[in-house]
Amino acid sequence: MKIKEEITYDDFTKLDIRIGHILAAEMVPDTDKLVKCTIDFGEEVGERTIVSGIREWYEPEQLVGKRLPYLINLAPRELRGVTSEGMLLAAAPIDTDTKERGLALLELDDDTPSGTTIG
C-alpha cells in the first residue's frame, strides 16, 4: 500500500483521537457487516454511537468491555438508518499467502481511562 499524501503537523492536530470503552454492541438490522456500538468517552465527551464495518472479524459480544481508539471529531454519518458519531481505528493487515485483508483491533494493555487523548 502506498504512503498517503503528506500532511502538516497542523493537519494532525485537528484529529481528536480518544480511548473509548465499549458498553454495548449489536448488529445493525438488515446488514451483514455493520456493528453498532455504544461507547463511553468519559465525562467530557460522554456516550456516543459508532457504527463499524467489522462483523466479518468480530461478533458484537466479543467487543463489549474493550477499550479502543476512536476518531471522535469526524462529521456524523448515517449508515443504514443509524447515525455514527466517530470512527474506530484499527489495523488492516494483509495475509501474505492469501492476499486477503484482515482486521486487528488496537487494544490497550492497561486500564487507560475512557476519554484519554492520543497524539
Image: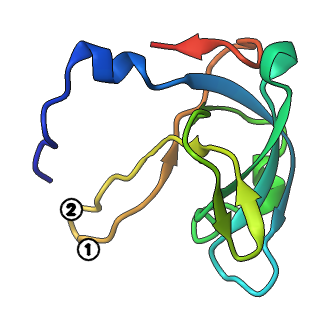
Image point (31%, 71%), residue name:
100
Image point (72%, 29%), residue name:
20
Badge 2: residue crowd in 10 Å (few <14, some 14–19, many ≥20): few
Q: Amino acid at mark 2?
A: Thr
Distance of label 2 from label 1 (alpha carbons): 6 Å
Q: Secondary structure at mark 1?
A: loop
Q: Amino acid at mark 1?
A: Thr
Q: Nearer the viewer, residue 33 or 82?
A: 82
Residue 10 position in % (x across, y down): 30, 15
Q: Is residue 16 left or right of residue 18?
A: left
Residue 93 position in % (x across, y down): 33, 52
Image position of 17 with respect to 31: above or below: above
Q: Secondary structure at mark 2?
A: loop
Rendered image quadrant of residue 58: bottom right
Q: Nearer the viewer, residue 35 or 72?
A: 72
Q: Is residue 3 left or right of residue 28?
A: left
Q: Is residue 77 left or right of residue 90?
A: right
Badge 1: residue crowd in 10 Å (few <14, some 14–19, many ≥20): few
Q: Nearer the viewer, residue 14 or 95?
A: 14
| Residue that label 2 marks | 96
Asked if the residue at tag 1 contacts the one at tag 2, i.e. Cβ–Cβ closer than 8 Å, the answer is: no
For residue 98, which numbered disc appears in the image?
1
